[in-house]
Amino acid sequence: MVGLRKDKKQHTKKIHRLMMETYEPIDNQHLYHAHHKNEIKDDNRLENLEWELKGKHISKHHKGKVLSEETRKKIGEAHKGKVLSEEHRRKLLEANRGKVVSEETKKKISESKKGQVFSKEHKRKLSESHKGHLVSEETRRKIGESHKGLRHTEEARRKMRESHKGKVLSEETKRKLSEARLGKPNQFLVGKGWWNNGTKTIRSKECPGEGWVRGRM
């Protein structure tokens, strides 16, 4: 470490970082770590240094490292109530852009979140952060495929019903829901047919073997 002074303020920097910033400057340096190619930390020759994305660099040095439950608990407590600035969020987003998560990691994340209950305040913040967020058709397709065959438990259904009680849908939302379900049987069976967007789907009397036909109200 070396001590630097600027505008009457003291700063400290690691030598290998200072070397790279001086002789190999790049854009968005805050997203990168200065990495020793030969893994020898005090070998600060310029030819032994390179820029590496923070996430990749941290992952490389922590590969195979298992944190104890006590350490995990301490990390969790240290981050409790911590609010990230917009700048910090932007940097994290940029650092993780294009990053592919393995199936094993996805499984671990899923298991770690099982039984997790979000507070109303947390749900509200999540809802606000997703406002205006557009999901691509490719992402919708992937989400649809990942949910195929999944069934909600009775407890989950009950919670969903309660969360929607008293909720008023806008005309725009109703229109989108109607278009999405057009031609699909509605879950509410009325009489001897399905009602869908004002259209009743009934068994054809003329051609009973031909299946279902649609008729207006």
Image: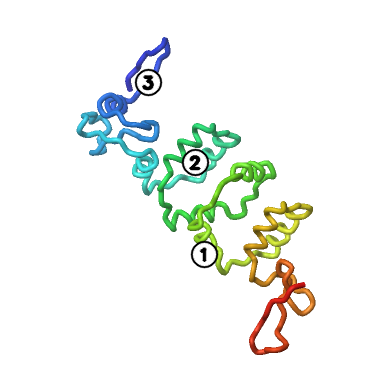
Up the image or down, 60 lies above or below 190; here it is above
Marks 2 & 3, CB-CB < 8 Å contact:
no
- Please give the name of the residue rendered at 48% of the width and 36% of the height, measured from the top-left corner: 90
Residue nearest the viewer, comparing 65 with 183: 183
177 or 61, which is in the foreground? 177
Q: Is residue 216 left or right of residue 143?
A: right
Residue 126, placed above or below residue 210: above
Near-viewer residue (131 or 10): 131
Residue 71 image label: 2
Q: Residues within 10 Å of mark 2 (few under 14, many from 20)?
A: few
Q: Position of residue 70 (x, y in %)?
A: 51, 42
**How far apart are the alpha carbons under marks 3 and 1?**
50 Å
Q: CA distance from mark 2 to mark 3?
A: 27 Å
Image: 163 above or below 52: below
Looking at this rendering, what residue extends furthest in the top direction?
8
Q: Secondary structure at mark 1?
A: helix
Classify 10 Å Cα crowding around label 1: few (below 14), some (14-19), many (20 and above): few
Q: Which residue is pictured at 47% across the width and 45% down the height?
A: 68
Q: Amino acid at mark 3?
A: Thr
Q: Give the left or right position of residue 206, taking residue 3 as reference.
A: right
Percent across and percent down for residue 95 are 42, 40
How far apart are labels 2 and 1 at the CA level?
Answer: 37 Å
Q: Position of residue 94 (x, y in %)?
A: 43, 40
- What kind of residue is marked 2? Thr
Answer with the quarter of the image where residue 40 lies: top left
* Residue indicated by mark 1: 145
Badge 2 or badge 1: first in the primary sequence: 2
The residue located at (62%, 67%) in the rendering is: 151
The label on residue 12 is: 3
- Indicate the secondary structure of the residue bearing disc 2: helix
